[in-house]
């Protein structure tokens, strides 16, 4: 069958696009959503069932619909969850909200377009005609698309060193994907744990371990030893910026932002002031300045920009203060067996000194892989056929400011768009709900106009 729109992906971006299309397309239109993720619509972030795993954005800014800002808070109230706009809801509740929102739209069977959910992976793609793309599925089927939206997200990053030489017994103590929480059932209360990576995933896993009864020491190792900072319960007023007046040379821009942070009561005011204009600022930077940002500024940007809920940060800070959690800065060199335990050799940051950490368990919390094309066989095949190309920074797919795929070969009569992390080269800040929901609505609106005029 040939569909008006084929959405490739099964996470939040795919659901946001689907919901917007259902609301805008006529009943005669058709949508196919391709994805084999069992947590369809929730993805890794919103599939967790632990209540302590919180959103990093206040509930009042997490509505699926940018023009209905209270929708998520209203949904929480309908389920007797006593949270206000400035509170931080659990990620599990948010995943249920996303699923409920989609289900509510799907129940309007006689008023909406056709929507088919295809549990499969798209493994290949080719142009059949000037107006149709054909997707090969790993179940042996094929489907056609007059328009396509690529919503493929990212996966868990691999360990930075090879562990193939370790025995199977020792390898069983290496957790390569921490989101499969069943591994915690094997951890004894007094076991020592080493976590690779010091970002948001690390904090989630530390608190999940404590909730499971773990009381042993936890060592955290990352290149810079930077851990996320926290939100405050009463945020300061956001600083105001004239985006056109900000310099486009990174060193000068940082100088301006540092100076501004000294004039406000809380540095968070500067970060919150940048949030609405980050995409505009990124697009003004020359490509080489963007590269400098990724090389030199990114870790500091992440810990200040992507903060954790106040009560979550307080719990983590207490563990740091009492010495239960220790954060080390260094470069991992090797992982070896130490009897039944693991031994990590690393070079301490800022010196040539060699250090070691021994632990009963090693948890890979190096975060999500960068959303490049190479992580997806489908995208690699589309690049081979020059249907898509990588953006200059290799963050994802090259798109224009309307999220349309930039392609030397793809016929313009086929609408091809990217929503979510794969469009980071163009937009940078495009991994959080407040940004993706706006992008999803814009893309759906453009697709609806294309379909109605064809």
Image (spheres, helix red, strand yellow):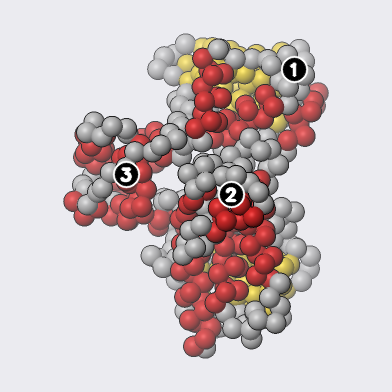
| Residue 166 in the image, given as x and y percentages of width and height | 74, 24
Residue annotated with mark 3: 238
Secondary structure at numbered mark 2: loop
Task: Indicate the quadrant where residue 208 lies.
Answer: top right
Q: Are marks 2 and 1 in contact (CB under 8 Å)?
A: no
Looking at the image, is mark 2 or mark 1 earlier in the sequence? 2
- Distance (Cα) linking label 2 and label 1: 32 Å
Residue 126 seen by the camera = no
Task: Indicate the quadrant where residue 379 lies.
Answer: bottom right
Residue annotated with mark 2: 154
Q: Are marks 1 and 3 in contact (CB under 8 Å)?
A: no
Q: Residue at x 78, y 68 (%)?
A: 140
Secondary structure at numbered mark 1: loop
Residue lying farthest left? 245
Q: As drawn, is 17 to the left or to the right of 276?
A: right
- Distance (Cα) linking label 1 and label 3: 43 Å
- Front-lying residue, 292 or 94: 94
Task: Indicate the quadrant where residue 194 lies.
Answer: top right
| Residue 97 in the image, given as x and y percentages of width and height | 64, 55
Residue annotated with mark 1: 189
Q: As drawn, is 190 to the left or to the right of 127?
A: right
Q: Are marks 2 and 3 in contact (CB under 8 Å)?
A: no
Looking at the image, is mark 2 or mark 3 earlier in the sequence? 2
Residue 37 seen by the camera = yes
Residue lying farthest bottom? 454
Q: Is residue 55 above or below residue 322?
A: below
Looking at the image, is mark 1 or mark 3 earlier in the sequence? 1
Secondary structure at numbered mark 3: loop
| Residue 96 in the image, given as x and y percentages of width and height | 67, 53
Q: Residue at x 69, y 16 (%)?
A: 215
């Amino acid at each position: 069958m040939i569909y008006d729109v084929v959405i490739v992906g099964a996470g939040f971006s795919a659901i946001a696009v689907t919901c917007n299309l259902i609301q805008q397309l006529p009943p005669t239109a058709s949508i196919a959503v391709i994805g084999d993720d069992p947590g369809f619509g929730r993805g890794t972030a919103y599939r967790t069932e632990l209540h302590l795993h919180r959103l990093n954005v206040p509930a009042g800014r997490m509505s699926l619909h940018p023009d209905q800002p209270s929708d998520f808070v209203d949904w929480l109230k309908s389920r007797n969850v006593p949270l206000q706009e400035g509170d931080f809801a659990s990620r599990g509740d948010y995943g249920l909200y996303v699923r409920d929102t989609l289900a509510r739209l799907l129940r309007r069977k006689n008023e909406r377009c056709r929507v088919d959910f295809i549990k499969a992976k798209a493994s290949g793609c080719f142009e059949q005609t000037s107006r149709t793309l054909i997707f090969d599925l790993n179940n042996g089927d094929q489907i056609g698309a007059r328009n396509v939206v690529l919503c493929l997200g990212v996966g868990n990053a691999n360990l930075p060193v090879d562990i193939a030489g370790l025995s199977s017994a020792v390898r069983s103590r290496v957790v390569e994907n921490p989101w499969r929480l069943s591994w915690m059932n094997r951890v004894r209360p007094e076991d020592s744990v080493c976590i690779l990576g010091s970002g948001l995933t690390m904090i989630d896993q530390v608190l999940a371990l404590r909730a499971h009864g773990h009381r042993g020491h936890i060592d955290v190792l990352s290149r810079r030893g930077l851990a996320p900072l926290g939100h405050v319960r009463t945020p300061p007023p956001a600083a105001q910026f004239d985006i056109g007046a900000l310099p486009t040379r990174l060193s000068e821009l940082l100088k301006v932002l540092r100076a501004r942070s000294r004039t406000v009561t809380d540095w968070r005011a500067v970060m919150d002031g940048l949030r609405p204009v980050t995409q505009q600022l990124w697009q003004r930077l020359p490509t080489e300045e963007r590269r400098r940002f990724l090389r030199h500024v990114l870790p500091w940007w992440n810990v200040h920009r992507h903060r954790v809920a106040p009560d979550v940060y307080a719990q983590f800070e207490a563990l740091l203060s009492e010495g239960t959690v220790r954060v080390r800065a260094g470069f991992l060199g090797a992982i070896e067996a130490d009897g039944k335990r693991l031994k990590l050799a690393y070079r301490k940051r800022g010196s040539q000194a060699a250090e070691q950490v021994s632990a009963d368990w090693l948890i890979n919390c190096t975060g999500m892989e960068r959303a490049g094309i190479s992580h997806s066989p489908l995208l690699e095949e589309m690049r081979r056929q020059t249907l898509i190309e990588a953006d200059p920074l290799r963050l994802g797919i090259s798109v224009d400011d309307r999220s349309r795929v930039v392609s030397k070969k793809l016929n313009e009569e086929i609408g091809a768009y990217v929503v979510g992390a794969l469009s980071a080269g163009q937009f940078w800040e495009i991994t959080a709900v407040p940004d993706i929901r706006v992008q999803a609505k814009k893309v759906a609106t453009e697709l609806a106009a294309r379909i109605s005029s064809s």
